[in-house]
Structure formats: structure tokens, C-alpha cells
Image (cartoon, helix red, strand yellow):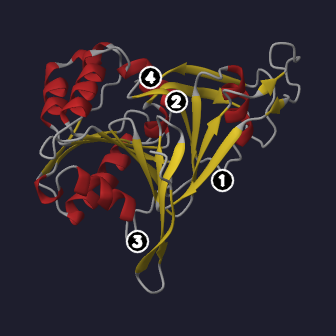
């Protein structure tokens, strides 16, 4: 158990399309976790096809919020992910932010490289690791690298690859409701029931502390999918066929929900009332 003065390893996993023009609550939360006005943030735009634009947009916003400084780490090949200057920048950061784009590109370049190791060191020492869209998917131990969209889970229509492994035992999917990704997450988790699925809507974030306590922020929902006791015909189903999945447990968590990722139970739910500016405690579990 960490002492109160010890930084807690924290992830801020964003489902994509977070507000950057209005109140930017999720990105302000990232800056606060990174140290507020004392934050030193590294932006990783590697996943994006528009890297200079991504750097410009996030740097402008972070400086507007108010931070001590920012840097960019942007290797284009796996060999470049050994660059000592980039490793040093990650080692000095209080916050690391990974943009959207292609999570497979992030996995190919960062996983198992010196820069990937530096991200793990940063996480362990208490620097907040934030990521949106592809930058969210890469945080889990395994990630969805390819997959059809839709509500119905189908056999062999999705593919997993190894992520950075900052969140062990989970698969994270993003743009969840907006792109109808329930089916592809269900199909993969039903075939790998030792893993837990997490689907995050746009402009929504899951803040994970020490790999255990998770709090939902933003305008959408977070879905936690548990197929450990489910029955499925995945071993026999033909390619492309709808899958039988019976007995799966799904948790739908809006902003204000606190969830235990070890015991997979709701800890607390505080409803935030936007009109009158108050919070209302709706439910609290005593099981944790």
C-alpha cells in the first residue's frame, strides 16, 4: 500500500473525440494529475497520420490550461524508439499523452523498446499516462488491432495484438457506442474469458489508480465486460457466424462511478448534477 505522499500509478484512458474547444474537462483532469502548473508533459503523436497538427493542438491546449513545459517524442521506426534523447524526455515527464490514430503502429514501435520501457518506468514512479483513441487501446495488455463493427458478436471478425501492458488482464476498446463496437469486444472476450473487456465512449475517460480503483469522467459511459462464467460456442462456430454468449456480466458505468477492477464490483456512484452544480450520492457498495 502506497503512503499518502507516494505518487499513485495512474492511467487516464480516453475513448476518443474528447472536448478540446469547450471546457475540456478530461484534458484538464490529465493536467491536474500530471502536476497542474508544475506539469511537464510529453506528447506522443506517433499513431496519427497528422502528427504536426496533433502536436500543435494539444500543446496549445495544455499551455492554455497552464503547465511548466512540454516536449514531443515521436519515433517513426522501432529503431528510433531507442533514441536516448527520447528516453530521457520520457524519464523526466510528469505526464505522457498518446494521441489517436493507429494503435497497431504504436504497438509496432513502442512495445518492448527502450521508449516503451521508459513509459513503464514513468507509470511506476507516478507520472500519469494518458491516451485517447489508439492511445487508449495501447495501454492494455492486449488490444484490438483489427475488427468489424456492429452489435452482434461474430466468429473470427476481430484480431488482437499485444499492447504496452500498463493495464494487465484487460482489453480496452474506444469510440465504443459511437462506432458500435460492442460485438467485437464481446467476441474477443468470450473467446479469451481470462481477460476483461473495457469499452469507453467518446469524450469519456476511465481514470485507473494503481491498476485497481477506476473512476469514470466525461459525457458517455464505460462498459466492463466479464465472460469468465459465460457459455459460448466459439470453439465450434464457423467463421463470420453470430456467436452464442450466455451468462456474460456487463457493467455500464456513467461519470461519477467508481469501480474496483480487481473484484469487478461497483464501489460508489456520485451523480453529478450539471444544472445546479451539486453532487448526489446515489449508491455505495460495502463489498470492497
Location of residue 235 in the rendering, given as x and y in whole percent from the top left corner:
81, 13
Which mark is first along the chain, 1 or 3? 3
Numbered label attached to residue 170:
2
- In primary-sequence order, the first of circles 4 and 3 is 3
Mark 2: few/some/many CA within 10 Å (<14, 14-19, 20+): many
**Mark 2 to mark 3: distance in Å?**
31 Å
Q: Which residue is mark 3?
A: 22
Disc 1 to disc 4, C-alpha distance? 24 Å
| Image quadrant containing the C terminus | top left
N-terminal label among 2 and 4: 4
**For the residues marked 4 and 3, what is the alpha-carbon distance in whole angstroms?**
31 Å
The numbered disc on residue 98 is none
Quarter of the view holding residue 80: top left
Q: Which mark is residue 107?
A: 4
- Disc 2 is placed on an element classified as strand
Residue drawn at x 80%, y 25% as measured from the top left: 231
Left-right relation of 177 to 57: right
Give the mark nearer the N terminus: 1 vs 4. Answer: 4
Total marks drawn? 4
Q: Are marks 3 and 1 in contact (CB under 8 Å)?
A: no
**Residue closest to the eye, 271 or 93:** 271
Amino acid at each position: 500500500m502506497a503512503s499518502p505522499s507516494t505518487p499513485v500509478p495512474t492511467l487516464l484512458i480516453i475513448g476518443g473525440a474528447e472536448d478540446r474547444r469547450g471546457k475540456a474537462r478530461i484534458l484538464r483532469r490529465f493536467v491536474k494529475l500530471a502536476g497542474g502548473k508544475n506539469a511537464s508533459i510529453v506528447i506522443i503523436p506517433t499513431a496519427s497520420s497528422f502528427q504536426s497538427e496533433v502536436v500543435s493542438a494539444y500543446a496549445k491546449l495544455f499551455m492554455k490550461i497552464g503547465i511548466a513545459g512540454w516536449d514531443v517524442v515521436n519515433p517513426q521506426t522501432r529503431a528510433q524508439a531507442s533514441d536516448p534523447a527520447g528516453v530521457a524526455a520520457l524519464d523526466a515527464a510528469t505526464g505522457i499523452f498518446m494521441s489517436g490514430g493507429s494503435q497497431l503502429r504504436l504497438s509496432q514501435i513502442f512495445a518492448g523498446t527502450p521508449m516503451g520501457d521508459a513509459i513503464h518506468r514513468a507509470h511506476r514512479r507516478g507520472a500519469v499516462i494518458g491516451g485517447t483513441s489508439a492511445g487508449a487501446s495501447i495501454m492494455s495488455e492486449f488490444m484490438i488491432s483489427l475488427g468489424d463493427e456492429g452489435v452482434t458478436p461474430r466468429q473470427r471478425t476481430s484480431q488482437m495484438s499485444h499492447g504496452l501492458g500498463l493495464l494487465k488482464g484487460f482489453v480496452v476498446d474506444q469510440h465504443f457506442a459511437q462506432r458500435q463496437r460492442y460485438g467485437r469486444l464481446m467476441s474477443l472476450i468470450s473467446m479469451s474469458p481470462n481477460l476483461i473487456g473495457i469499452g469507453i465512449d467518446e469524450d469519456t475517460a476511465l481514470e485507473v489508480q494503481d491498476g485497481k480503483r477506476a473512476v469514470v469522467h466525461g459525457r458517455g459511459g464505460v462498459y466492463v465486460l466479464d465472460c469468465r462464467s459465460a457459455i459460448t460456442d466459439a470453439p465450434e462456430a464457423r467463421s463470420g457466424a453470430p456467436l452464442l454468449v450466455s451468462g456474460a456480466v456487463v457493467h455500464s458505468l456513467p461519470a461519477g462511478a467508481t469501480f474496483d477492477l480487481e473484484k469487478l464490483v461497483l464501489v460508489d456512484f456520485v451523480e453529478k448534477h450539471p444544472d445546479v452544480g451539486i453532487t448526489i450520492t446515489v449508491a455505495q457498495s460495502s463489498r470492497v
